[in-house]
Amino acid sequence: MLRLSEFKFFYPERAEATLASAQPIELPDRGLHLLTGPSGSGKSTLLSLIKGLSPHYSPGTFTGKIHYKNELVDKDFVHKKQNEIVYLFQNPLNQIIYQNPRLEFCFTAESQQISYDRFVKHKTSLEEAFNLNALWSKKTTELSLGQAQRLLLSSLLATHPKVLLLDEPTAFMDQPARKLFYELLAELKEKYLVLLVDHHLNEVQPIVDSFIVVDQQGRVTQQHDLKPQESFDFAHLKSQHPLLQNSEGYQINFEQISFAYKKDQPLLKDISLAMRAPEIIAIRGENGSGKSTLLKLIVGALKPTSGQIAQSSRVKDITKNIGYVMQNPEDNFICDTADEELLKTDKEFVNIFFPQKKLNLSPYSLSEGEKRRLSLLVHLNADKKVILYDEPTFGLDQKNKYFVAESLLKFRAKNILQIVVSHDEEFINSVADRVFTLKDGKLYET
């Protein structure tokens, strides 16, 4: 059993508690329990406390106690029994060590001194469950974030843990992949205690045993039934922002584009596509299908193996005219503080995404959801002709996802071409003028 006493947690130099619970929280040895609440409310911090990373290995002050099976989760527990409670981070890039996926898969078990016989017995079933054979020929730097999550979760399960702390494991999965993952969770909860952070409430709720709710003020409560959530009308959002045709808009044309990271393994094959401002183009597809690669080709980070990309700008003007919201939020930051990152951003959008929040702090100190919001704001700039978004809604709750959708539609009215890579069907349907699916290297309009 996992038990949290009444507690408070303070980050350094903050007078107000980041997290606080006025009642103890008790969880049984098995089951699935959903941590839910607004983006940036402290859900990841709560997982870090349960794992024992905070405050023992990261700064902060914790008043309270956490016990697992009557043992205090302190620094000594984390050191000696680290395989009892395992933690999948929200951003998998912060957890990968090796370039070789096989070594990465084996590392967790090796570091926790799991016997070879016990490890091999479990390895085959995990390879099948997570389709790992498709990853062995790649480098970890070549994996999509969804593939990286699969690799890391399987490596954690190979250690035979008792408690799984999963922070947004479905953030980079499409709906069919999420369905399969939730089916897997329904099986895992019969063997493990699973604490899950996930914003796909309607999909995961049927298999959840209880809810741990963290509100905007960081107050933590345990509930057996989730109270009705604030609803947002995604279905009619686009009709409130009609598309204004403009034949003079910025243009990007793919002309028989092909690309391969390795000569004998083509990723993109003879793709032709004409795009023109002010439309919003959405591109979806399975993890590793090449969606992010398409965006990198547009900004010139990669060169086509064959074919060409014609744009309205000269090559040297591309960086000035194109904004690129990269999949990993931290890749978008170059300044010391969040305020500096936002000097060119319309204050209207800043106030929507960060109401009453002081931003004179390092962007790297924000929660993953807040980092995603900041990375979007950095590029929501009316001086741009094109804005590219790679998974813009991951880690965001429904409220902030709605704000993102509304922002894209407002920028469409400014005659900006926007290209969105996303697994989020609700979001895609609320903003996209045209939707394409990337499959087997080909782009199909759907």
Image (cartoon, rainbow, N blue to C red):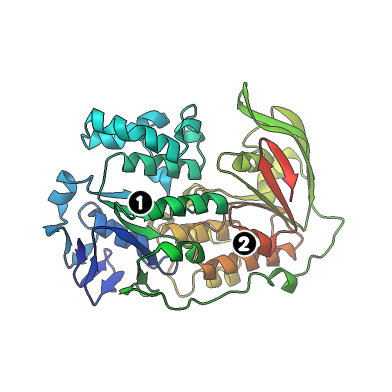
Counting from the top left corner in percent of width and height, residue 233 is at 63, 74
Q: Secondary structure at mark 1?
A: helix
Relative to 346, is 179 above or below? above
Asked if residue 333 shows in the view, the reply is no
Residue type at the position of mark 1: Leu
Residue 433: percent from left, percent from top? 75, 59
Residue, x 37% and y 59% (percent of image)? 196
What's the CA distance linking mark 2 and mark 1?
Answer: 29 Å
Which residue position is annotated with label 2? 427
Query: Taking 148 as reference, is 248 above or below it?
Result: below
Left or right of 343? Residue 86 is: left
Residue 96 point in image, percent of width and height: 38, 39
Numbered label attached to residue 188: 1
Q: Quadrant of the N terminus?
A: bottom left
Q: Are marks 2 and 1 in contact (CB under 8 Å)?
A: no
In the picture provided, is 209 more to the left or to the right than 284? left
Vertical comparison of 302 with 38: above or below: above
Q: Amino acid at mark 2?
A: Phe
Answer whether residue 274 is visible to the viewer in this image: yes
Mark 2 crowd level (few <14, some 14–19, many ≥20, 10 Å Cα) = many
Q: Is residue 378 left or right of residue 243?
A: left
* Number of marks present in the image shown: 2
Residue drawn at point x = 62 percent, y = 58 percent: 425
